[in-house]
Amino acid sequence: MPGTATLVLLETTTSNLRSASQPAISAARKLAQANGGSVVGIVIGSGIGAAAQDAARYVDKVLCCDSPALAAALAETWAPVLVAAVKQTGAAALVASATSTGKDVLPRAAGLLGAGMASEIVAVMGAKSFRRPTYAGNALTDVEVLTPVAVATVRQTEFPPAAPAASAGTVEAFAPGPTDALGAEFVALHASASARPDLTEAKVVVAGGRGLKDAQNFKVLEELTDLLGGALGASRAACDAGMVPNDLQVGQTGKVVAPELYFAVGISGAIQHLAGMKSSKVIVAINKDPEAPIFQVADYGLCATWESTVPPLIAQIKAVKATG
Amino acid sequence: MKILVPCKRVPNPDLKLKVANGSVDLAGTTWQVNPFDEYAVEAALRLTEKGKGGERVGEVVVVSIGPKDTSAQLKQLLAMGANRAILVAGDDSALDSDLVARILRAVVAAEKPDLVITGKQAVDGDDNQVGQILAASLGWPQATFLASILLAADGKSATVTREVDAGVEERRVRLPAIMTVDLRIIGKKAVRNEALAPATAEWEDTQRLASLKGIMAAKKKELREITVESLGVAGGILVKTLRHEAPPARKAGVKVASVEELVAKLHNEAKVI
Ligand SMILES: Cc1cc2nc3c(=O)[nH]c(=O)nc-3n(C[C@H](O)[C@H](O)[C@H](O)COP(=O)(O)OP(=O)(O)OC[C@H]3O[C@@H](n4cnc5c(N)ncnc54)[C@H](O)[C@@H]3O)c2cc1C
């Protein structure tokens, strides 16, 4: 008989909860209301004692599964830990943010549990029902999970970052079972170094597309980005052309962003791109083609080349900032 | 090397989606292979190519679950170069990711492939679950969201790169395994079988089209139609679709005539700078 706890996978560094997991905590709290139970976090990794303490500020209890064999986020070893934790806590729901780790690990856990899963939910409609975007965001679909345990990944932009709870939760060690990676092995992470805020969390995103023509031209967008303290983004075409690293791709199959201010520069506005930025508060489009679909979603459209508009835009924003 | 490539047909994503009365109306759409699955077929074909003799070494089997006319999409994949196709009769409205994975598991049990490659998600449901559930149910390792695959010369393992939030992650995985592919898998040098293709081998920077010769050859290739019952798969879905609705439309924006006007609007009206 499944109980009513809600289990949330919390991603961490060795010392901290990752901010990417905060929206999952907000979703877990909603589910806990529907389930009438507590929110139990689980942290998995190696040498993560301090991170477990940090995570405990947000939830009723943290299960800390700390083992050298779990250092890399391999679905093969992490999913069985989640399954064991669901069973031990009697949880009625298992959630995580729809990060690349969440999207890799949670469906495997759902498969092992024989549980139904809803991907990238944007709303909790009830203990077992969820709303999620489908067809590249051209439909919102309500689904109901029919199994005793519901599994879901959470679209980060649609749930607010969680605030710490009134009192911190407890931390309990959680023993991993056998950790067989089935021959899967982490080799290396080639991280794209950037001093800018995370694309998915930035208040301002400046994105460039094929219209920028080459990598060199992104310099001027970077200047605008840094002036606004934002993150740089791109269309698939710009990534494919090697103008910027692939992890800057915004869209259905890239990152989903919803900043206060989104600049689409030299981006046509294909539905796959719109799927990743349509929820932005204010959208500015700069494109030389008056027929470009991006203008249909832009709050402010400037039909001109970026060459003739971005440099004066930078100068004038500087002027506005100087006078306040 | 025998590679199984599960493929889904999806409605043309470039056509405007009709959402009304709680459902999606696909009556007037055209159907196509899910782009990520087409990329998976391209990746699978490359793993059998560019050996010394020039002929294909290994077999690529495509499988789809869908209504009878999904045979059109399977024929296209045969024309691209896949060796054989299997069509399991089924209808999207009665399927979910779990049931699809269970059907595929039965196909894997019958076909015994060395490797399963599929798209990371279907662009209609956008679930991104089937590969992972299938891997779980088979007890196989999984390598998801792949940007490259280098199959070891002994055919027993592969080194892959994955597109992750922080950049590019490199992993090694033992075969048999489930791989799901991302967009960049069709890059010129993204996929190679060390047993066949030299390090210098290159493909076109895209998935291949069916050639006229391919289309002729496809006519003679096997396209076997089977049922879910014949695979011994029973049981229902775990996730029920209740309703669809159109997302809220963004309110119409304005065109600005100059940079001055844009900056003024952003400062005074939107108050974002
Ligand atoms: C399965 C699949 C998944 C996909 N996923 C994504 C995704 O996640 N994200 C994504 O972005 N795309 C995705 N795409 C690709 C998408 O369909 C488009 O091809 C892509 O978004 C186009 O990028 P773009 O707008 O930069 O290029 P284009 O469509 O070529 O547009 C370039 C624009 O630049 C303008 N321009 C040219 N020169 C100038 C200038 N000097 N000044 C100002 N404007 C100029 C042009 O008018 C044009 O509108 C996906 C496609 C598929 C098939």
Image (cartoon, grey):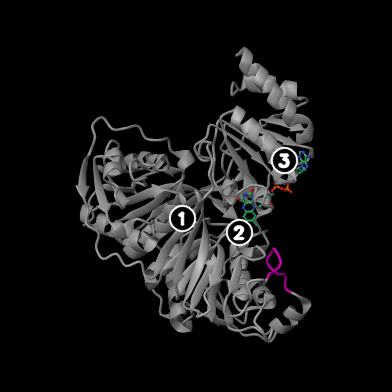
Q: Are marks 2 and 3 in contact (CB under 8 Å)?
A: no
Residue, disc 3:
A217
Residue B249 position in % (x across, y down): 61, 37
The answer to whether the residue bearing label 2 lies less than 8 angstroms from the nearest atom of ligand 1 is: yes
Quarter assignment of residue B44: bottom right
Q: Are marks 1 and 2 in contact (CB under 8 Å)?
A: no
Q: Does residue A308 appear in this view?
A: yes
**Inter-mark Cα distance, 1 to 3:** 45 Å
The residue depicted at 54 percent of the width and 68 percent of the height is B118
The answer to whether the residue bearing label 3 lies less than 8 angstroms from the nearest atom of ligand 1 is: no
Q: Does residue A114 appear in this view?
A: no
Quick check: B109 left or right of A276?
Answer: left
**Inter-mark Cα distance, 2 to 3:** 24 Å
- Amino acid carrying mark 3 in the image: Asn
Quarter assignment of residue B254: top right
Residue A136 position in % (x across, y down): 58, 50
Q: Secondary structure at mark 2?
A: helix
Residue, disc 2:
B183
Tell me the crowding category of disc 2: few under 14, some 14 to 19, or many 20 or more residues within 10 angstroms, Cα based: many
- Amino acid carrying mark 2 in the image: Leu
Residue B125 position in % (x across, y down): 53, 57
Q: Secondary structure at mark 3?
A: helix
Closer to us: A229 or A170: A229
Closer to us: A204 or A28: A204
Quick check: B28 left or right of B131?
Answer: right
Residue B122 position in % (x across, y down): 55, 60
Magenta extent? B202-210
Q: Identify the mark nearer the N-term, 1 or 2.
A: 2
